Image: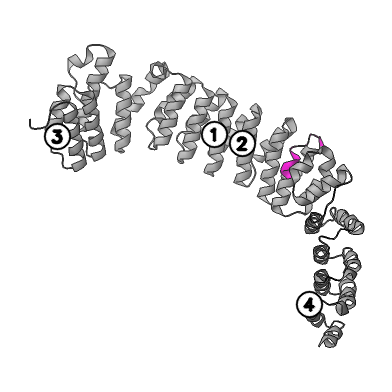
Amino acid sequence: MLWVTLRQLKSGTAATRRKAAQELSQDPKARTLSALATAALTDSDVEVRRIAATALGRSEHPGRYEPLLKALEDKDPEVIRAALFGLRKIVDERVLVELVRLLRHPNFHVRVGAAQAIDTVRWTPKDREERIWFQNAKGWYRRAAAAGVDALPALQLTIQTGPVQAAAGAVEALGQISDPRIIKLLRSALQAEEPTVRVAAVDALGKVGGGEAVDALTTSLRNSHPQVRVAAAQALGVLRAAEAIGPICKLLRDKEWEVRQEAAIALGRFNNPAACEPLASALNDTDADVREAAAMALGRIGDRRGVAPLILALKDEVTSVRRIAAASLARIDPDWASLPETRGVAEQLKLAIQDAEPAIRFFVAQLLVNLGEMAADHTFEFTPEDHLGSPAIKRKRMATHLFIGMLEDPDRDVRQAAAEALGRLGGERARQALARTAADVDGDVAAAIQMALQALGTESGS
């Protein structure tokens, strides 16, 4: 019965009062309004006050306005939020004044609740300051920051009291404001416990730029969290802060591959030959993504000191690394094959012919033939006439010998590729070699040989 529930609402036991308030909140009536208002404003138990405020908000009685307005002054944020929910869609000047005031409340969720309540009525901020605080409470940090230094108090409050994502958003928005105080705030954010906030601070410092920002970013290269180090390297690369080249080069030895990759990418943005040697070492990294980044960076720098290490990268086991290395070589010099650096490294490439990986043997052999660097006494027999004629004829003859030898390679993929190459090269020697190996034990290789013989205009056995 109702009178029993109302009596329980005055019980000396908090649990009993909570239960009574919960029952009344299911169907708040005019008769219960006074009791709920008293509980919402005076009960010593926070949960009782919250439930009572929620019940008042569900009531349709106009008498709920006054107690809900007073509940906005409660010390507990949850009670205030319950009252805010009940005041939505109420077009009343007193309500709006209170909602605007709460946009500055020290509790993040209260500020959000006030902004949401304001959103349910027609309201226009009376000045720039009100607009900033409303935008900040709505999570529109970039819009707030567009107001400049006037937005600092609101953004700082979010950084200090907001959850991780909100704090990170406010920190990042600081990068839009041009004011000396920003660097100090961002340095402070670099000490945040959450890595997400630290990364946001690094991103903002990259937008601010300048000597102090570069100093802070360089320090961040040693941050304990890898994503912070990644962000710092990226920001310094975008700023092209030459003084950071040395510290970034050290990151090429970082234990995390993402950091090493970003360090290589950043070094490519500097266009500074001083980074060539560290990047050349990175071409031997255990991670293919890092090797790709290093190869691309050497191409961007465009210094001929990158030629030799890039040529050696042409025998990388990963196709994408080889492709990027080739593109970078062409970017450094379209005629890179004729450079002295190329000839100097050819001897090292010849050793790769004995590599255990068939695909590498095949690729390097083709490269050496194209360079004209395959020695006459290396792996295959060449006749004196192979060294006569134009460079083009010479390379074709040497390539033919090379691929004929590969028809007997233990790896079926190499044999198949050699057969296809001989079909394109043509010539009587190629035809004879293909005919001799037409009975290859592997069906795909045998089919490739038949197709090559057909391309040469002769069927095997004919």
The Cα atoms of the two marked residues, 4 and 1, are separated by 66 Å
In the rendering, which numbered label is found on residue 264? Answer: 1
Residue 300 rendering spot, x and y as whole percentages:
53, 26
- Outermost residue, top side: 389
- The three-letter code of the residue at mark 2 reads Gln
**Cβ–Cβ under 8 Å for marks 3 and 4:** no
- Could you tell me if residue 411 is visible in this image? no
Residue under the point 83% across and 52% down? 122
Relative height, residue 75 to residue 112 (above, below): below
Q: Is 383 a magenta residue?
A: no
Residue under the point 83% across and 38% down? 149
The Cα atoms of the two marked residues, 1 and 3, are separated by 47 Å
Q: Nearer the viewer, mark 4 or mark 1?
A: 4
In front of the other: 385 or 75: 75
Q: Which residue is mark 4?
A: 27
Relative height, residue 361 to residue 99 (above, below): above
Residue under the point 86% across and 56% down? 99
Identify the colour scheme used.
one colour
Q: Nearer the viewer, mark 1 or mark 3?
A: 3
In the rendering, which numbered label is found on residue 234? Answer: 2
Residue 37 rendering spot, x and y as whole percentages:
89, 73
Indicate left or right for 260 with 109 as reference. left
Q: Which residue is mark 3?
A: 437
**Cβ–Cβ under 8 Å for marks 2 and 4:** no
Q: Classify mark 1: residues with Cα within 10 Å, few (<14), some (14-19) or many (20+).
A: many
